[in-house]
Amino acid sequence: MSASVDLADFLPAYLAEAEELLGTGHRQLLAMEVSLRRGVAHPRAVRELFRAVHTLKGLSAMVDVEPIVDIAHWMETCLRNADRAGGRLPQASVEPLMEGLREIEQRVRQLAAGKSAAPVPAGLLARLEALEVAGAAGGGGVATGGAAALALEEALASRLSPAEREQLTTGVTGARRAVRLDFIPGADRAASGTTINTVRERVASLGETVKVLPLSGPTVGGGSLTFVLLVLTEASDAELQEAAGGPPASVRPLVVPATAEAPAPGLEAPGVLEEEEPEESRRSGGTLRVEVSRLDEALERLAALVVNRSRLSRAVAALTAAGAPTRELNAILQENARQLRDMRTAILRLRMVRVGDVLERLPLLVRGLRRSTGKAVRLALDVGDEELDKAVADRLLPALVHLVRNAVDHALELPEARRALGKPDEGVVRVATHGRAGGLLDLTVSDDGRGVDAQAVAARARVPMPATPDALLELLCRPGFSTRDAANATSGRGMGMDIVRRIIVEQLGGELALETRPGAGTTFRLRVPLTITLLDALVFECAGLRYAVAVGSVEELIEVDAARLARPAGAGGLCLLERRGSAVPLVSLARLLGLAPGAAQDAMGAKALLVRQRGELVAFGVDRLVGQQEIVLRPLEDPLVRVPGVVGATDLGDGQPTLVLDLAALGLARGGKPSRREASAKAERYLS
Amino acid sequence: MAEVLVVDDSKVMRDMVVACLRPYPGLTFTHASSGLEAIERLSLQPYDLLVLDLNMPDIGGIEVVEFVRGQDRLRELPIIIVTTRGDEASRARALAAGASRFMTKPFTPDAILAEARGLLEGGRA
């Protein structure tokens, strides 16, 4: 079992997340300080700060940054005491905690600059340690008495911390109520985008969620799980129910108003204090930080508009066919299509990041490698102002990290060896961009090291000497292939090359090429698309093969109960499935795809995906649902291989191409009634 | 083919766990960024291995373990708990709740891979 993974590779990602956690930490600590000055507890800020610090500690341990682990550990202990005391932090704790965050931040910056993290200043740990003692001694007095009772069964109430109870009972003021919202998750709801995550997001815009408790047990609709959200809100029951996807979600009051007393003096509603400045409103230098998920949401909304537009255009076409005067309407429709395209471009542009920003962590990596390998190496970044979609950048970076690592670890010689060869002591690894063409970005990663020894590679793979650079690259990219020589290298050329190729070629649909000259160096040439399409997909199995469909296209996911299938005589073997009292045609996807020619009628599959085909529901029988995941959709660009019903391919991580289907289009195309109108509607759905 | 659900609110941590387990052939991974999301996914589809962080924003790893062990269907699901120094008390509670293995940060890729291998191949009866 070879350690083919080096957690040090995660240092750049670690630094990025550490910065975010520090940002959260600072905000929560400031919120706590404001509360303290007003004599109020702020349990949520204490918990959030605790979590940020705890996560930092764990991550820092993984990438071996001991000083941060130590500081975080003592801060965490102090915060744990405050949480046990109902979110009351002693005033004296604020300054040392502030100092702790600053010291961690300083060390993160040191690491980002390629230095090692400085040891912990002795005084700080002593101060934090002193807090722990003081906190443990005085942490008892939790003011929970007197507050209104919670209308909550004991099984749930017992799962609330004192701080959470206090927050719920004291948080009720004026129009603000404490309610429980019951959300019942399900595969069909997940398929239509209603999951606990989206429900939480929607509820967050209506009020403050104090706690979410999972509750096992039979539910309406045959499930076995209910999420109980305990919320402080001014929103109506209807709004809350809507946020949880409508019935069977339900809303009940939580704090019985009759017993509600006037809040104790000095205890204000925590809600007043929790109006934190939203992060995205903090502008710096004319740029705005926005969570990627918000951009994705905008894109989803746009996709809905596009689908709606295609319905509109079908309706107009029908009017035209019926002889109605639709010239004006058609002109508006055309204008509308152009506007939608422009808007899509504008949103996609928001997702673009500069390549230079993506690569800014590489110098840090190289400095680390210089220390660990003892090689003299310089990183030359020769990067223009090209931009890439964030999703491409996130995938590209690990591939570049692999290539740079390999170059330093393996390709570059030690200084003495270089001198003997007449090369300068210091090796150079160069990462350069070479502009864009045809929607692709050209990049190279090159070194002036020893080059790839094709003969050695061939000998190791036990194959004849590769005749071309492509054949050599092919060998290097064989999964698990390594030229690693235990005597003299920490990692080998070839280590992870299969991963590099999988990212660049299979995932991103790009190209990877190799040029190498023995003794002079190696250049990897990468071409990656500037943008990719991400799709939330349902993955399933059919006749032993995996397929994916867009989650949004599936109306519902159901079990096929063979006993309840009907096969009306004279329907040409058509099978009907009963769903909520109406009959839905069931089509075997395996047969549709020609995977099970002449299969028995019973081979209808165990599950069915319900899809709307020209407004009518059709069930596609499949064998097994594999799961839901985000995939990179690679459209089938070549018009010659374009197949109706197949929108593209993806790599699910197993290195095998998986087809992404459009079931509605597939059903129409194979159902014997392919219509030109439908084809153009489909083309519109994918706009551009 | 085996399905692994990796639950951690830190994306870097999830990515690290996936990278560590990647050398094991035939695994596919699903991420969940919170305990609630994990419970939802577990209630909707089967998994072969659960890798779980203890400390998460909404509900913690212990509650997820309790939920899993409370479901007939999931009683045998192997669970690897990922903890951090200082979590000792929670670790005892997670063990009582029915966790299968513990990994304390920092752990090596080989260590978690070996645990996963043992759980996936060891027969779950």
Image: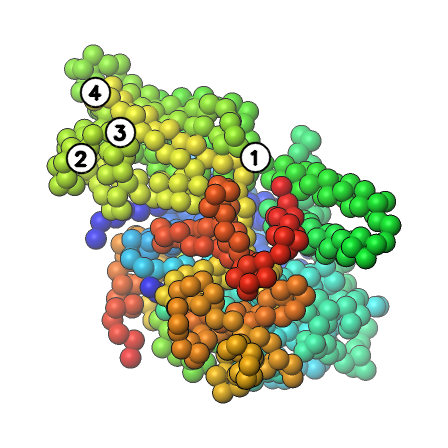
Kindly indicate whether the residues beneath marks 4 and 3 are on one polypeptide chain. Answer: yes
Question: In this orientation, does residue A163 appear?
Answer: no
Extreme residue toward the bottom, this view: A563
The CA span between labels 3 and 2 is: 12 Å
Residue at mark 4: A519
The CA span between labels 2 and 4 is: 15 Å
Question: Between disc 2 and disc 1, whose residue precedes?
Answer: 1
Question: Between disc 2 and disc 4, whose residue precedes?
Answer: 2
The CA span between labels 1 and 4 is: 36 Å
Question: Between disc 4 and disc 3, whose residue precedes?
Answer: 3
In front of the other: A74 or A496: A496
The CA span between labels 4 and 3 is: 16 Å
What residue lies at 27% left-to-right and 63% top-to-bottom?
Answer: B117
A535 vs A419: above or below: below
Kindly indicate whether the residues beneath marks 1 and 4 are on one polypeptide chain. Answer: yes
Question: In this orientation, does residue A426 appear?
Answer: yes
Q: Amino acid at mark 3?
A: Pro
Residue at mark 3: A469
Residue at mark 2: A457
What residue lies at 56% left-to-right and 35% top-to-bottom?
Answer: A353
What residue lies at 73% left-to-right and 69% top-to-bottom?
Answer: A242
Left or right side of A685 for A265: right
Identify the subunit bearing mark 3. A
SS class, disc 2: helix
Q: State which quarter of the image contains the C terminus of chain A.
A: top right
Residue A676 is tagged as: none
